[in-house]
Amino acid sequence: MRIDHANLLPKLITLLCLFCAQVSAQEVIHEEKSKYRDITVTQQGDRRCLLFNVHRGDRNQTCMLVSNPDELVFDYTRMSFAGLLLNPNPKSVLVIGLGGGSIPMTFSDLFPDARIDVVEVDEAVVRVAEEFFNYRDTENMKVFVDDGRPFIKRAGLRGVTYDFIVLDAFSGDYIPEHMLTREFLQEVKSIMTDESVLVANTFSTSRLYDHESVTYQRVFNEFFNFKLPTSGNRIIITQLEALPPRGELVARARELADSLTKYGVPLNDYPRRLSTRVDWDMSRRELTDQYSPANLLRRN
Amino acid sequence: MSAAKAHGLPKSVIAAMAFVSGFSIMTVEMLGARILSPYFGGSLSVWGSIITIFMLALSVGYLIGGRLSTRHPSPTTYAGFFMVAAITSLPIILFADAIMEPIFLTVVDPRYGSLIASILLFFIPTAILGMISPYSVRLMVESHEHSGHMAGVLFFVSTVGSAIGTLGTSFYFVLWFEVNQILWGAVIALLLAAATILLTQQLFQSRGNHSQGYANRPRKSAS
């Protein structure tokens, strides 16, 4: 959702009204304050949602249809599976940020034999995911209550690698600045092999878009920039090797599309949306451990 | 207010120095989480470690600084605090990774890892900055009746310095500069403070020689 500044105020007001109307129609079924945030679970008919810091106007983190929990409700969760176009059969998956658990549960369903590690910094989110969103650790899937950065650093030191890495640690309200930096992405690289694909859920608005793009480009040379007109998220998809040509993506999508239908992922639509065109200001400063005021840049 | 005393430092200069120390303490503290997060993450416990160590270091500093002020308080020692604080802050800039990496490798729990790292990186410079507060009070106080007033003025100034250091760092400095550039700024500010103390001491001592009657008047607090 790109907002142009001239129209900002009326749009904001409209959004706010929509938001209020939406909240009032929803029934709050659970509320708790964790170490990091206020967690709210709402239900409206069949649709159950997880919200963080609802009083400060955050949008839904994740939603689930109670009658059809397999279906991925949000564009950005569906978009994360575009990474399968680069590696269609991951044996090991790392997901940073549990939320309602829809991304790891879909992986577990798709690839029952794959090892899936999930890292979530907030133990309350783990509890809520288990109680309200059907998340369960399985033999092959385990959630670790830890910060993503030291978890990845340690994995790298132990020589552990993952075939599919999802970075989804960025709630709308606060961005963990230490997970946007060049040094962090280099640590992520250390747990990747030539087979691995990295999928990062990032921001498509504000100055941060430029800074993030510059940083990913410096570390990975090139990446697929994946945006949908219906989503405020931008998904970065990349790998260590050169990116595959579009023809290959289209072919892969055709092979895989059927297996993803039940989750609501329109994989065949995705290849033409994966762009390598530079649409950011390349003169922006790269984010490093020395310079990463992400939360301030987002407000500018 | 700014009359020179026997030791040669006007009150306004002492107050300015208290401001600089309060400012530097909070500037470094606010950067603490940023320095530790690559190794120990950005969780609440990391902030907890940093704040705990700063509080402990300051409390020890207050005790030692107060003790040191009872014997021959002198601007030279006072300037020395600033200089030593600047020098002991240098490892934060120069060796942070070398210090944190072995801790990260040996201590798995990020709570204790960040606590140990905070001790090694921040304890000594912060304790030394803590010594400045009671020592400033001693240099500024001329009589028992005034001691509470002077302490109040100094706490006011140094806490305003802390507030501005906190706000400046978290709102603006991190947007304009790199972490190490800000730390160098704090080190240079401390060194300039030391130089200012020594220079004003020289200046006012030589002036004080011409007005001995005033400078050496009997003081009620003389021990």
Image (tube, coloured by chain):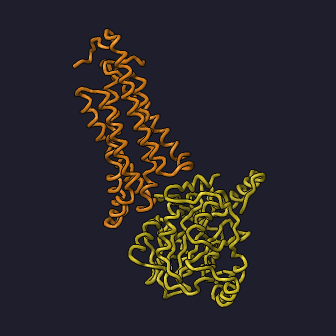
Chain identifier for the orange-coloured part of the image: B
Q: Quadrant of the N terminus of chain A?
A: bottom right
* Residue farthest along the top direction in this orientation: B213
Chain A drawing hue: yellow
**Res. A62 in view:** yes
Q: In the image, A272: left or right of B81?
A: right
Percent position of residue A239, x then y? 57, 77
**Where does the image place residue B150, in percent across and percent down from the top left?**
37, 24
- Above or below, B91 relative to A77: above
Compare residues A217 and A295 and report the one nearer the observer: A217
Q: Nearer the viewer, residue B193 or A26?
A: B193
Vertical position of residue B158 compared to residue B39: above or below:
above
Judging depth in this view, the residue of B64 and A32 nearest the camera is B64
**Image spot of residue B99 (x, y percent):** 34, 58
| B102 relative to A247, above or below | above
Q: Residue at x 33, y 14 (%)?
A: B209
Horizontal and vertical percent for residue A139?
43, 84
Q: Could you say which quadrant of the image residue B38 lies in?
A: bottom left
